[in-house]
Amino acid sequence: MTTLTNLTNPTNLTKESAVGDGTTADGAVQDGGQAGRTATSAGRGARLVAVGAVLLAAAAALLLGVQAHRAAAEADARTDALAAARESVPELLGYDSATLDEDLADALAQTTGTFTSDYGAILDDVVKPQAKARRISTVARVSAAGVVRGDADRVVVLLFLTQTTTSGGDGETVAGSRVEVTMERAGDDWKIAGLRPV
């Protein structure tokens, strides 16, 4: 009887319903806390992804900038080395018998590295004796030129030359040739580090 009364009493039902609702409310609060933590974790993850993306973009931009700078430096080097070769190779190969010692000293000043000693030996052993004995003078002119390969410090160029030579009373001869010239940076200048006919 008591049990039936308890079950049929509206007050008791309200209390039970209230208890039940309280339990549901507690569960909702707990679920809300988990959802909040999940949202916070998701937000943190999104921020980390965004930071990572920004860092990757910055690294890519830096890499592209370095590559662009290197490419520009190499392009400038090729232009400068080619211009220097067009000017210095005629000085290297040209001389006048009347001013031979001065001209050969100027020719040697256009060189660098081991090529300086190698070319100096050729001038002393071959060019100077023959030029003095036969009164040889020669003028070299660049008719065409281009870059073969190169980087910021070393550039190889190809020159097409026309060389006019006079020898005592034997008249004048004109000859064409092609030479591959290695130019190396020497401070702010470019010097000849190698030369070979091709």
Image (spheres, rainbow, N blue to C red):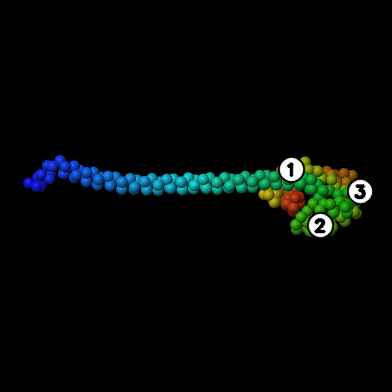
Q: Which residue is mark 2?
A: 120
How far separated are the C-alphas under marks 1 and 2? 25 Å
Going by the image, does 99 lie left or right of 87? right
Q: Nearer the viewer, residue 36 or 184?
A: 36
Element type at marker 1?
Answer: strand
Element type at marker 3?
Answer: loop
Q: Which residue is mark 1?
A: 145
Label 1 crowd (10 A; few <14 / some 14-19 / many >=20): some
Amino acid type of disc 3?
A: Gly
**Res. 5 mark:** none
Q: Which residue is mark 3?
A: 168
Amino acid type of disc 2?
A: Gly
Q: Nearer the viewer, residue 69 or 44?
A: 44
Label 3 crowd (10 A; few <14 / some 14-19 / many >=20): few
Amino acid type of disc 1?
A: Ala
How far separated are the C-alphas under marks 2 and 3? 24 Å
Estimate the x, y position of residue 5 in percent, counting from the top left: 10, 44
Q: Is residue 131 visible?
A: no
Q: Earlier in the sequence, mark 3 or mark 1?
A: 1
Residue drawn where x is 69% and y is 51% of the image: 153
